[in-house]
Image: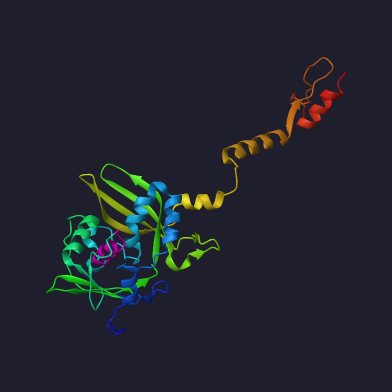
Amino acid sequence: MTGEATKKHKGTHKAAFPIGIAVTVLALIGFATVIVLIGTGIKNLAAKNKDYSQYNKLLTPIVLIDPKGFDDITNADMSELIEMSIWAILKSDISPDKYEIGEGGIIIPETDVAEQFKKLFGTEVTPVHATVEGYEYEFTYDADAKTYTIPITGIVPIYTPNVIEKEENSDRIVLTVALIAGEAWQQNADGSMTQPEPDKYIRVTLRIQDGVQFISAIQVTTTPETATTVSNTEGTTENKDLLDKADVAAKDISAPKTQNVTDENGENVTDENGNDVTETVTEKSTADSSSAAP
């Protein structure tokens, strides 16, 4: 596959670049799908979000390609759906000798791609098989042999998923997902990976049918309020309601007060118009008068 023949249908992205892997190396290690996917970092995400680890695993091959998104599966880009299905196969726990390796790469039958397509997206849409052109790689479809040829390369994923929120009802699950740029991960001295700040967020809708979940929508969304709140309030234990009440109380105590002036008999003193004469006092002056009283 030449550079001229490769169509960058999503535009150039610095996070995606090919790494050539020799076929002889594959034979030595007995591993048919070489994909560099920040494995340690994804494991760390799963550890931090144990309840969401299954969703992070499901969405890894989905967000890897930075999909355009769709409001409904019937409006999705078929080429991207096929591409996601193939990546899902490559990211699954397949046996090293499951697929034949030809001159152009790994040979995957159309039937396997169709089966994976159904697992991800259900039966509302039918896969239309054709060559997929991705970032500096191509999944070549052979209509006569009914197979896809996958070049033996590795890539840095454009994004890795971190599910941060889940909304669920009887027929669907909506996941809020932080997308972490693949190239932004940092490796520490001890070999662990440090997660960078998310590039953006998406909402993934899973439709539930007969107890099985299918991806039915992928939509870009704004930064979730929960993420903003955590960021802005980290390290503080202030309670806003209590602070508001304390502020009102402080104003009430410090505010000047008035009281009627009385004579030695306790009667209110009035002016020439018959109005009660008052004087201004504060809590402090009242307290001082009380303490000075015999």
Residue 126 in picture, x, y percent from top left: 16, 61
Which segment is the magenta one? 81-93
Query: Count of labels shown?
Result: 0
Q: Which of 272 and 245 is in front in this view?
A: 245
Q: Residue at x 77, y 20 (%)?
A: 268
Residue drawn at point x = 50 percent, y = 53 percent: 228
Q: Residue furthest left?
A: 144
Q: In this view, does 272 lie to the left or right of 232?
A: right
* Residue 212: x %, y % from top left: 23, 48
In this image, 46 relative to 131: left or right?
A: right
Quarter-wise, where is residue 285 in the image?
top right
Which image quarter holds the N terminus? bottom left
Does the magenta stretch mainly form a helix, a strand or a loop? helix
User: Vertical placement of 203 versus 283: above or below?
Assistant: below
Between 22 and 166, which is closer to the camera in this rendering?
A: 22
Q: In which quarter of the image is the C terminus?
A: top right
Query: Could you tell me residue 14's position as x and y percent?
Result: 42, 74
Q: Which residue is drawn at 84% across and 17% down?
A: 264
Residue 281 seen from this side: no
Residue 8, compared with residue 245, is above or below; it is below
- The residue nearer to you, when weighing 292 against 185, is 185
Would you say 265 lies left or right of 184 here? right
Compared to 277, does 97 lie above or below?
below
Residue 56 in view, yes or no: yes
Q: Where is residue 57 in the image (x, y as percent from the top left)?
A: 35, 55
Residue at left offset 44%, top offset 60%: 40
Was residue 271 drawn as part of the magenta stretch in this picture? Answer: no
> Would you say 25 lies left or right of 83 here?
right
Quarter-wise, where is residue 60 in the image?
Answer: bottom left
